[in-house]
Amino acid sequence: IEKTHSEKAGIQNIIPVIDWNQCLEQFNGDEAVVRELLASLAMDLKLSQEKIAELYAANNEEALRAELHRLNGGIVYFSLPQLSQTLAAFHEAVKAKSQQAKRLDATYAALHEAITAFLTTVQLDSFKKA
């Protein structure tokens, strides 16, 4: 599914990639720890993004669900609204695959974009500090 630039930018403009203030609060204000953990998560997400793409292309629903569950366990400790929301939506779509093929494709694309946005945010060290 090909989207226009404005459609791709839509989720990134509406839902923050990282809720920096909430992340800091969750880790007692220790910015160094938050940055280190986010960098570690980014390395894991890069590998997971590739694995999800392979499993999705192969229609390996069981392994895909297991990987999504594992991924959720890794992000649950952070305030990553965009990634949390798109992961949950895709996971639900995978469970209902036979009923909603279009939703599966759309939620997969959204998750891929959210992971890419997170990786870019961490790489550029562009956390929004309000």
Image: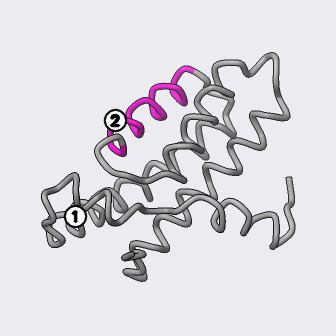
Spot occupied by residue 115 in the image (x, y as percentages of width and height): 53, 57
Crowding around mark 2 (Cα neighbors within 10 Å: few <14, some 14 to 19, many 20+) is few
Which residue lies at the image location 35% right of the left edge and 54% below the top edge?
A: 44
Which residue lies at the image location 79% right of the left edge and 34% below the top edge?
A: 103
Q: How is the image coloured?
A: one colour
Say whether residue 65 is magenta. Answer: yes
Spot occupied by residue 76 in the image (x, y as percentages of width and height): 35, 40
Question: Which is closer to the viewer, label 2 or label 1?
Answer: 1
Spot occupied by residue 77 in the image (x, y as percentages of width and height): 28, 44
Which residue lies at the image location 82% right of the left edge and 71% below the top edge?
A: 6
Range drawn in magenta? 62-75
Q: Amino acid at mark 2?
A: Gly
Secondary structure mostly seen in magenta is helix
Image: 92 above or below 104: above
The label number, if any, that marks residue 73 in the structure image:
2
| Residue 111 relative to residue 68: left or right | right
The label number, if any, that marks residue 80 in the structure image:
none
Spot occupied by residue 59 in the image (x, y as percentages of width and height): 68, 29
Say whether residue 73 is magenta. Answer: yes
Q: Quadrant of the C terminus?
A: bottom left
Describe the element under mark 2 as helix, strand or loop.
helix
Q: Amino acid at mark 1?
A: Val
Separation of marks 2 and 1 at Cα, in angstroms: 17 Å
Question: In the rendered image, which quarter is residue 122 located in?
Answer: bottom left
The label number, if any, that marks residue 34 in the structure image:
1
- Farthest-out residue, front: 130
Describe the element under mark 1 as helix, strand or loop.
helix
Image: 92 above or below 80: above
Crowding around mark 1 (Cα neighbors within 10 Å: few <14, some 14 to 19, many 20+) is some
